[in-house]
Amino acid sequence: MTRLQHTVAFRLDSSVDVAQFLDRCRTLGDIPGVINLEVLEQFGTKNSFSHALSMWFEDVDSYEAYNNHPEHVAFVNETWLPNVAEFLELDYQRL
């Protein structure tokens, strides 16, 4: 089995209610196919990102279903795009 890890590190706009934003991020874990959603806070100083999300998927089909799921699309358009100043998305598979 090849599991996929989807991660995104990000920095929020300064006017964002961080707790409310992160609570909204946690709802992504309710979308079918998401395994082990983690909402993370950066403690290091080597980059400008303040937080990250990490989640796993069983396979590419599960990831694509999540990516196109109406709840994810709404999250991106209504929550992510208006509030995230910068981000870096990284997707991995186990070898």
Image (cartoon, rainbow, N blue to C red):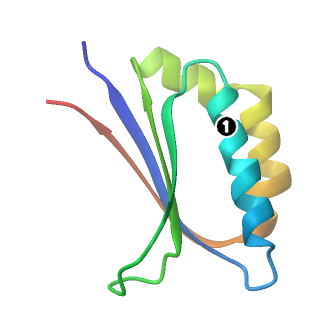
Quadrant of the image occupied by residue 6? top left
Q: Residues within 10 Å of mark 1 (few under 14, many from 20)?
A: some
**Residue 56 % position (x, y):** 42, 31
Quadrant of the image occupied by residue 70? top right
Reply above or below: 90 against 12: above
48 relative position to 20: left or right: left
- SS for dot 1: helix
So how many labels did they put on this image?
Answer: 1
Residue position for label 1 = 28
Reply above or below: 13 against 80: below
**Residue 53 % position (x, y):** 51, 52
Q: Is residue 73 visible?
A: yes
Q: Is residue 81 visible?
A: no
Q: Residue furthest right?
A: 78
Reply above or below: 8 against 91: below
Q: Residue at x 39, y 18 (%)?
A: 59
Looking at the rendered image, the quarter that the C terminus falls into is top left
Q: Residue at x 40, y 18 (%)?
A: 58
62 relative position to 30: left or right: left
Q: Amino acid at mark 1?
A: Leu
**Residue 44 % position (x, y):** 35, 81
Q: Residue furthest left?
A: 95
Looking at the rendered image, the quarter that the N terminus falls into is top left
Q: Residue furthest top?
A: 1
Q: Residue at x 55, y 19 (%)?
A: 33
**Residue 7 % position (x, y):** 44, 49
